[in-house]
Amino acid sequence: MNLNATLIGQIIFVLTLVVVFFTLKFAKGKTPNLPLVGFYSIVLNVIFAPAGWIYCWYWSTKPFLPK
């Protein structure tokens, strides 16, 4: 199996999409500014992927906003 820049870029792109999807799913109902959460998730996953995973975990453990 050849590992080249194209394959690595595709893997990073797919992982970014998955983590952003789950981050937005977890953050729904927990933040008043959902687009900003999505933007931060994309930036963290592109710059340093484990930080994006930790950000996703943060939103999965945060309690819902009171109504």
Image (cartoon, rainbow, N blue to C red):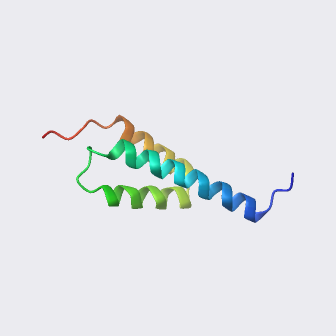
Q: Is 61 placed left or right of 14 in the picture? A: left
Q: Residue furthest right?
A: 1
Image spot of residue 15 (x, y percent): 59, 51
Residue drawn at the location 26% of the way across and 44% of the way down: 29
Q: Residue at x 43, y 39 (%)?
A: 57
Nearer to me, 63 or 20: 20
Quadrant position of residue 40:
bottom left
Residue at the limit of the structure toward the left, as seen here: 67
Q: Residue 2: x percent and y percent?
A: 86, 56
Which quarter of the picture shows residue 65? top left
Left or right position of 10 against 19? right
Task: Please give the name of the residue rendered at 33% of the width and 60% of the height, measured from the top-left corner.
Answer: 35
From what the image shows, is residue 25 above or below residue 2? above
Percent x, y of residue 4: 80, 62
Horizontal side of residue 18 vs 36, given as left or right: right
Displayed quadrant of residue 46: bottom right
